[in-house]
Image: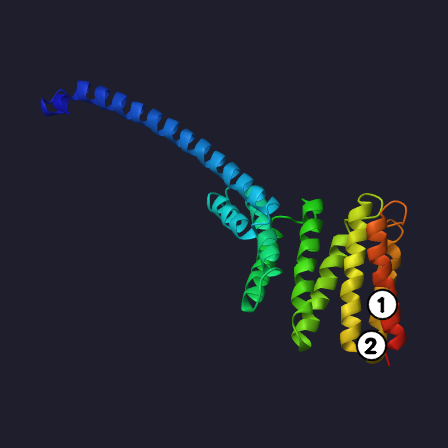
Amino acid sequence: MAAYAKKHFGEAGKLSEGSAAGKVRKAREASATAQQFTEEAIRDFRLAGDAHTNNYRFDLALLAYQKARELTSQSDDPRLWADLTLLVGNSEHDIGIRTEGDRIYHHLGNAVAAYQAALMVYTKEQLPQDWAMTQKNLGNVLSDQGTGTSGKAGTQLLAQAVEAYRAALTIRTKTQLPQQWAATQNNLGLVLWDQGTRTGGKDGKKLLRHAIEPFQTALQVRTKDALPVQWKQTMNNLKETEKALANLR
């Protein structure tokens, strides 16, 4: 500036260019440092969320995952954003099934929204395993929503849960993921059982018959010798469904 004031324009130009180049370099260094700190903060918030989840403090886990997600965006890093959105949905679901009153529907609704948002990134074509896992999680929440909702709205939620489980089963096959496949079959059977007992009559019997099939299918993997706890669970579900079918008029 002094050189410019003295009308030493050649010298002023060189000095200004040198100063500008130095500031650009410092800005880039600061930007790289800021990016590093941001990535570390996301990692730390995510680890905090995982720790709170393992400690059954799902409220604290939700806050940590939300803070991590606020530091990224779907456009900048879609996979990371979807991973964090899935974790937000899991926490909302965990809170929803452990709370009371209207807060149940609030948190379960938030979980559904989070899973649906994650599915915008987790596509079946590009990320099939993540897509199937999220479809399964979505089915779980829709099932819980449907069970706690009466009338036509509850029936529609259960039908959506069935769709989500069936979608997951297109990827979660017996050959590739036998235990996950069997667990999803068991969950599918439970939703169909709930639909059948609600519906009643001829249509209810049809739904209960449809529920028997996934329970029987799950028992191909959930055997008494290999998975005794899961075998007993699914056997009980099967027996209750058969009993409900026999008693339905």
Tag 1 secondary structure:
helix
Mark 2 surroundings: few (<14), some (14-19) or many (≥20) residues within 10 A: some
| Cα separation between marks 2 and 1 | 15 Å
Q: Quadrant of residue 20?
A: top left
196 left or right of 79?
right
Q: Can residue 178 be seen in this view?
A: yes
Q: Position of residue 180 (x, y in %)?
A: 77, 48
Q: Position of residue 125 (x, y in %)?
A: 70, 47
Which residue corresponds to the image point at 78% horizontal and 52% vertical from the top-left? Answer: 183
Tag 2 secondary structure:
helix
Mark 1 = which residue? 241
Mark 2 = which residue? 203
Which residue is at the far top? 11
On screen, residue 14 above or below 217: above
Of 180 and 96, nearer the camera is: 96
Of 14 and 200, nearer the camera is: 200
The quadrant of the picture occupied by the N terminus is top left
Q: Can residue 116 be seen in this view?
A: no
Callout 1, which amino acid? Answer: Thr
